[in-house]
Amino acid sequence: MFGIKADWSLDIQERYFTIDDYEGNEARWCDGCGDHAVLATAHRILRDAQLPPEKSVFISGIGCSSRMPHYMATYGLHGTHGRALPLACGVKSRRPELDVWVATGDGDCFSIGAGHWIHAVRYNMDMTILIFDNQIYGLTKKQTSPTSPIDLKTNTHPEGSFLDALNPLTVTLGITNASFVAQVIDWNPPLLYETLKAAHEHKGTSFVRIIQRCPVFVDGITKELQNDSSKLLLLKHHDGIPVAAGLERLFPESREHDPSDMTTALDIARDETTKGIIPVGLLYKNEDIPCYSDLSALGHDITDEDKIAATNKALDAFAI
Ligand code: SF4
């Protein structure tokens, strides 16, 4: 591939990537599952950024959404339940040049992986976390998850779940060093694309909660939102997620929100629990927080001999 630069010299690209270069195995999610939309969006973002597939890695835990690494022709790691984030932190720490993505769900991240969620956000390593939140355990057949709404009838709570749903936005905003917190719906492709693109471009940990359709087990939850978008509150700002004028018309409710304003971000996030108003857009962004991946990468470039000498010196400290 080649083009013409501004000085009329040839701009030669040795490799040009198409969507096919990022597509892995055929996705085996159910028909109508929102995961398909997220996968297609990730393919587009990598293609548009022309990221070499061998420089990207998708890491997941366990759950329907955690099959995502199989469907990417990048490097990938399908980990153990709740452990996607520590695995991703480990990869980023040792290979900071890689483009790291995490695919995890509400069960995987907010329940068994909750401790890792807190620390990964605090580390603020440069990675993009996609939370596929369908408000149910899908893979294990309709069990109550931390974000299942109260009274939802599930196989673990046949008479209805007892507790109010966990609010992932207020929790994440409350974690020290949170640097990018956004929420989006999977059934609006332009908004999903712009949100994941902004998350990917952010230097630091980008936390994106994707409200995801699971038509097999909890069709009603997202159908209600699709039929009545007045329950969604579109957040607009020149520093937020770009929203085209045509797109804005699809959201009867919207407001200006400066994503550098943490106090208002928390108020907006809290309204989801107390008033049922579901924000979509960028709640918070802070580009000044250091990335632990930069700090942990210090010394990566020393020689093998120096590494062995340093290891021996450290071990000598325990000699008696
Ligand atoms: Fe998607 Fe639900 Fe099917 Fe899992 S069970 S693949 S979340 S539709």
Image: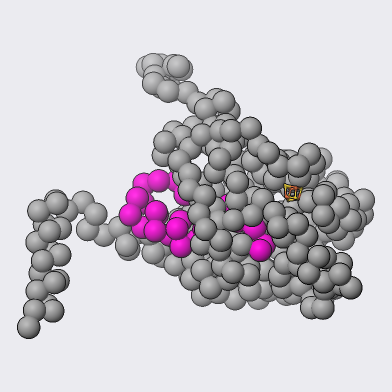
What's the residue at 48%, 44% (across, down)? 76
Front one among 234 and 120:
120
Residue furthest right as drawn? 227
Where is residue 40 shown, x and y percent of the image? 65, 37
What's the residue at 80%, 41% (across, down)? 32
Number of marks: 0
What's the residue at 65%, 37% (across, down)? 27
Where is residue 213 shown, x and y percent of the image? 78, 50
Q: Quadrant of the C terminus?
A: bottom left
Residue 269 visible, this orientation? no
Magenta extent: 84-107
Residue furthest left as drawn? 320
In the rendered view, would you say 64 is above or below 284?
A: above
Q: Quadrant of the N terminus?
A: top left
| Residue 89 shown in magenta | yes
Where is residue 103 shown, x and y percent of the image? 58, 52
Quadrant in the picture for residue 183: bottom right
In the rendered view, would you say 8 is above or below 107?
A: above
